[in-house]
Image (tube, rainbow, N blue to C red):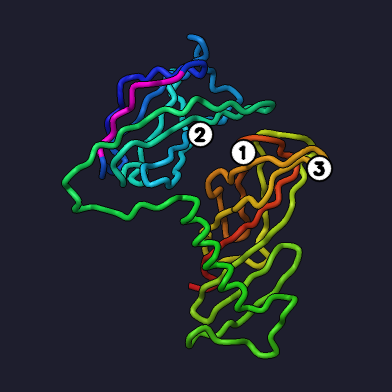
């Protein structure tokens, strides 16, 4: 892992010189930023600092920056350097009361002739939507409480063994051991906030901790305006619970309407 020399990023000024990266690297570099406002270092206390990058092919990737006591560090993932050319990056800095965006700055991704480990460029947002579409399609096969089946249907040669819906969401058990769960709900946190957590209980237990994701549909404050929220990572799962959090990028976030999904097994 290579850590770059400190990159000075003044939130009050435009950065002209591009940052240089190399196409095709795999988690090979950490960008080290000294973020300041007019020469005063930005303290990480109470802040969520996220790095967003629009790649040369217009796909968008992002990563949460960490702080080592002096610098903000951003790990350059494989997806960030799949495509060569000029990318545009920015930081979004969220506190309990405000949201600040840096001026966009260029990142030059140098092409390489070594394509042995080439991967297709995708948007992390598009990839997430594809997962949700697949899960929704399978959930719809179960009928749900609004369209119950009189006899359990088959998916290929594997029948759906059990399906039920309630306040804790909808789950579907398949004969091959797969179990899916989905819940859409609105959570009211009582006031406009920058970060929030959630803790959900599955209606039935998984055999082992499942893979789970959350997807924000709307973040807003009733009677004020809408905001933009991002599900912060996948959170933590056990066989019976899913916990995680949201952070606000802009606008107001008191109520969050989100969809939650999990896929795992109900038997070994």
Q: Residue at x 30, y 54 (%)?
A: 119
Q: Position of residue 163 (x, y in %)?
A: 65, 77
Q: Secondary structure at mark 2?
A: strand
Q: Position of residue 213 (x, y in %)?
A: 55, 55
Range of magenta residues: 14-22
- Whichever of callouts 2 and 1 sits on the residue coming sooner in the sequence is 2
- Whichever of callouts 2 and 3 sits on the residue coming sooner in the sequence is 2
Residue topped by disc 3 = 222
Q: Say whether marks 2 and 1 touch (CB < 8 Å).
A: yes
Which residue is situated farthest in the top direction here? 39
Circle 2 or circle 3, nearest the eye: 3
Where does the N terminus fall, quadrant-wise?
top left
Residue topped by disc 2 = 50
Q: How many marks?
A: 3
Q: Position of residue 126 (x, y in %)?
A: 48, 55
Marks 3 and 1, Cα distance to the nearest angstrom? 18 Å
Q: Say whether marks 2 and 3 touch (CB < 8 Å).
A: no
- Quarter residue 9 falls in: top left
* 225 left or right, relative to 68: right
Residue topped by disc 1 = 247
Q: Residue at x 36, y 42 (%)?
A: 56
Q: Secondary structure at mark 3?
A: loop
Neighbour tally class for label 3: few under 14, some 14-19, many 20 plus, Cα within 10 Å? few
* 67 left or right, relative to 226: left
- Quarter residue 212 falls in: bottom right
Q: Position of residue 178 (x, y in %)?
A: 52, 73
- Whichever of callouts 3 and 1 sits on the residue coming sooner in the sequence is 3
Q: Secondary structure at mark 1?
A: strand
Marks 2 and 1, Cα distance to the nearest angstrom? 10 Å
Residue 51 drawn above or below residue 206: above
């Amino acid at each position: 892992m290579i850590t770059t020399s400190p990159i000075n990023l003044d939130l009050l000024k435009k950065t002209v010189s591009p940052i240089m990266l190399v196409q095709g690297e795999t988690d090979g570099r950490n960008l080290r930023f000294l973020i300041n406002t007019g020469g005063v270092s930005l303290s990480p206390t109470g802040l969520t600092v996220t790095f967003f990058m629009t790649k040369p092919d217009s796909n968008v990737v992002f990563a949460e920056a960490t702080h080592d006591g002096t610098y903000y560090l951003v790990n350059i993932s494989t997806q960030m350097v799949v495509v060569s050319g000029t990318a545009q990056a920015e930081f979004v800095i969220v506190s309990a009361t405000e949201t600040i965006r840096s001026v966009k700055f260029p990142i030059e991704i140098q092409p390489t002739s070594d394509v042995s480990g080439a991967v297709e460029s995708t948007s992390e947002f598009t990839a997430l939507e594809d997962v949700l579409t697949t899960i929704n399609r399978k959930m719809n096969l179960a009928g749900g409480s609004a369209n119950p089946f009189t006899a359990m249907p088959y998916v290929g040669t594997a029948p759906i063994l059990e399906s039920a819906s309630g306040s804790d969401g909808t789950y579907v058990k398949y004969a091959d051991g797969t179990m899916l769960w989905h819940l859409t709900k609105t959570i009211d946190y009582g006031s406009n906030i920058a970060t929030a957590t959630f803790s959900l209980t599955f209606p039935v237990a998984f055999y082992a901790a499942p893979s789970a994701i959350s997807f924000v549909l709307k973040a807003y404050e009733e009677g004020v305006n809408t905001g933009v929220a991002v599900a912060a990572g996948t959170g933590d799962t056990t066989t019976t619970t899913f916990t995680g959090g949201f952070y606000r990028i802009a606008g107001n976030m008191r109520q969050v309407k989100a969809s939650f999904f999990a896929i795992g097994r109900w038997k070994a």
